[in-house]
Amino acid sequence: MRLWPRAFGGGARRRGRRRDADDALREAVLALLDRDLDGTEKLLAGEAQRDSGGVGVFLALGRLYRLRGEIGRAVRIHQNLLLRKDLASDDRVRALADLAEDFRRGGFLRRAIAAYEEVLAHAPRHAGALRALVRLQSDVREFDAALAVAARLDRLEPESRATVAVLLEQAEVAHAEGRTTDARKALRRALRRDVRHARAWSLLGELEAELGRPKAALDAWRRVPELERRLGAQVYPRLAATFAAVGRARDHEAYLRELLLAQPDDGPSRIALARALAARGDTEGALAELRVLLERDPDDLDAHHAQGLLLLAAGKDAEALRAFAELLQRVERLGLLGRESSL
């Protein structure tokens, strides 16, 4: 009969410890939400001392140290956890993943890669580790390894398009290093996987132009605004120059008008059309296009800026001065002075 009170008493003590731990963690969360990092540490450290066999509190404490930039302390917490013989497999994976992130935040990229590879040895479908490893291997320019991991991630999360992202970065690096052929090869591989990737087409246009293939460059650049209008402003000057170089300046205008027919409120396309008209001397036509934008949105700063430059180029200094004065007034009224703006 004496076993019952002992059993019930033990259960009560365990329930009491759980309540104490829950209370401590709850208070730590509240302190963290109040951005009281010192208070959070005090609560977590106190609970870790009271119940050194817990795992969650040590993981939380390690993440807190990492949040505060105390990478060495975070690493020690996670390494000590991994030395424990009683660590459950799920907790081991969590501690390994946190250790890998410690290394990454501390700039120890090789050690981070090794740690994430160990995570995947225990949990091959760990999406967070796959994503981090793809990023790290790309950062250290190990693109073949990054592509192998990206293929695993794409199978797990098809929407991630990790392989395309790695190929695009590989192309950008090759381009920056002057390896145009290698860059073009990587881009072609990326576009075979995702023919609607606007950034890939934009870079391919640059490569084709560097290789002396203006028609191929035009074909690539024309696709960019059709796929992603916000990137149009980046390619319109290149399109204008290339159309002019091959003697097809009017085709550039026709192309822009087609885009505007499909989407009349496309500001960058209309500004590009205004510049194309001004380039062949049709100042009034160019100003008319800009007025369309300003009537729709009087606070369109890009349109005001383009209007001022156009008037200045046309020798209409007084009108240009008024246009720039209005632009500055709108910038000031919108509270953009002293901040980065679209200008």
Image: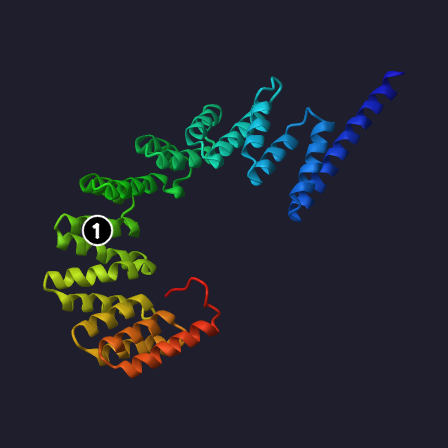
Residue 164, position as x, y percentages in the image? 32, 42
Residue 144, position as x, y percentages in the image? 30, 31
Helix, strand or loop at mark 1: helix
Above or below for 285 versus 19: below
For the point 21% across and 38% down, which residue is it? Answer: 182
Going by the picture, which residue comes out furthest to the right? Answer: 1
- Image quarter where the N terminus lies is top right
Label 1, residues with CA under 10 Å away: few <14, some 14-19, many ≥20: many
For the point 47% across and 74% down, which residue is it? Answer: 333
Going by the picture, which residue comes out furthest to the left? Answer: 247
Direction from residue 278 to residue 334 in the image, left or right: right
Q: In which quarter of the image is residue 227?
A: bottom left
Above or below for 336 versus 73: below
Direction from residue 27 to residue 303 in the image, left or right: left
Q: Which of 310 and 56 is in front in this view?
A: 310
Q: Which of 292 and 141 is in front in this view?
A: 141
The amino acid sitting under disc 1 is: Glu
Residue 312, position as x, y percentages in the image? 26, 76
Residue 160, position as x, y percentages in the image? 40, 42
Going by the picture, which residue comes out furthest to the bottom? Answer: 318
The residue indicated by pointer 1 is 206
